Image (tube, helix red, strand yellow):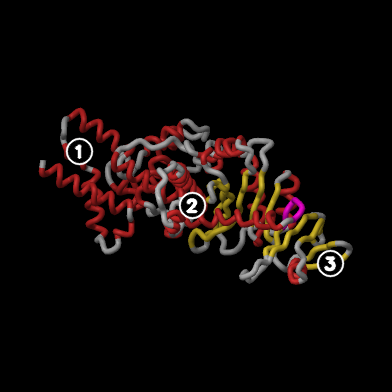
Amino acid sequence: MFRVRRKASWLMWTSWVQLYPEYRNGINSQCLNRVILITRQVFRDLRICDTLAERLVSDADHSWRGCPCGWGYFEDLCDRETGLRKTQLEGLADCAASALATRCVNTAEWQTVLPRRVGDEKSKERYISRLLGNRLIDPFAVMQGFIPEIAESLGDQGKTLVLMMDQSKIRDGFECLMISLRLGERALPVSWAVEATQGPIGFSVQKKLLEQVKMLLPPGINVLLAADRFYGTAALIGWCQRQGWDYRIRLKDNNILHHEGGQITTGEAARAGLAQLLNARFNEQEVTTHIGILHEKGHPEPWIIAMGQSPSKARVLDYGMRWGIEALFSDFKSRGFNITKAQLSQTDRIDRLILILTIALYWAISTGMKPEAKRNQTKKEARSLISFFKKGLRYLLNAALTLASIPKLWAYLKLVGW
């Protein structure tokens, strides 16, 4: 009995470290790894009875420590049209669950929790490496199993799908251009491209991603694209117009426009106090658009927003919905998986790493949507509950500790507005 209680204390301490990573500070990494290894053997060491022990070990391989309810991830992937084989789906589910458990992209840490029966750590290392290098795993094909469901659910509610496009640094020399879908004041990854560059990614890559996203969306659904001023080009605006998409795209202050028989730059229009420009044409282009301008007190720069509808203050402020993708990048980086710490140097491997993190992110956000019992909250506490990602992550890790069931993916989607 003493042995069981001692193991239970190790178990609780390890789970506390996982739920609150700040407690890792000052902990010897070798000691922590030893604790994790002991925890992985808890069910085997209890020896309650041979039959029960074997069942627990089997469950542990799919829903314990390294894989919080990972068997559920695998079953969900099998039900989706991804075009992947069972072994590939198992690999994605196992790695996504390991990413959730460790909250990092360090594959060495994944190896300590990877829920697979392989010989040694080197075998696990090779397994993860083969998965990231497997060219048969196409992120776009996998997203075909996820995005239509979300889009149809939001479309059934009569909502306009808000897409956001932005670029972020993955690591030195690598940039990621991503298109995401707004959900619950946050964003979900839809399509992405990783390029070995230090500058902005051009329209040719933007167009490729947009075409992929268009294929993922059901026909007849209303779409609005929001993008920062680095994407405020006649090419992008013209593409949106041809697809029948609405848009809120910020422009730089040096764009030359033809308006009412003369020329004016966007910066000059803002300084003149104009609130709108109707049917303004880009210089030496055949693309015409409406432009709304808003310069609020306390803001150093005005918002100069291209849009497909007649400008108004409310429509200019629609551009603020773009900030959801900033929170998404934060979940991928410092507040979540620390993707900037990845040591990968091939763009296709980084693509598949983002795919694994996207699946993990989907489960964390979906689980975090679960309604909570109402209670008196301070303003600070209420704000902290906005993050579905963090709330869902803690719920999943706790479910791994208690072997509790988790909600079906997107079970609470219709309760959340964009």
Residue drawn at x 16%, y 33% as measured from the top left = 48
Residue 60 sits above or below residue 254 on the image: above
Contact (Cβ within 8 Å) of mark 1 with mark 2: no
Q: Which mark is drawn over residue 350?
A: 2
Q: Which residues are magenta?
A: 306-311
**How far is the residue under mark 1 from the one under mark 2?**
36 Å
Location of residue 69 in the rendering, given as x and y in whole percent from the top left corner: 36, 39
Q: Earlier in the sequence, mark 3 or mark 2?
A: 3
Instruction: Please identify the quadrant where the N terminus is shown.
Output: top left
Q: Which mark is drawn over residue 180?
A: none
Residue drawn at x 46%, y 43% as measured from the top left = 369
**In this rendering, which labeled residue sits more in front, label 1 or label 3?**
3
Q: Earlier in the sequence, mark 1 or mark 3?
A: 1
**In this rendering, which labeled residue sits more in front, label 1 or label 2?**
1
Can residue 315 be seen at all in this image of the molecule?
Answer: yes
**Which residue is denoted by mark 3 in the rendering?**
263
Q: Is residue 58 magenta?
A: no
Q: Earlier in the sequence, mark 1 or mark 2?
A: 1
Residue drawn at x 26%, y 59% as measured from the top left = 29
The kind of residue tagged 1 is Arg
At mark 2, the secondary structure is: helix
Q: Residue farthest to the front?
A: 376
Q: Residue farthest to the top?
A: 51
Residue drawn at x 66%, y 48% as measured from the top left = 224
**Which residue is denoted by mark 1 in the rendering?**
44
Location of residue 102 in the rendering, given as x and y in whole percent from the top left corner: 35, 51
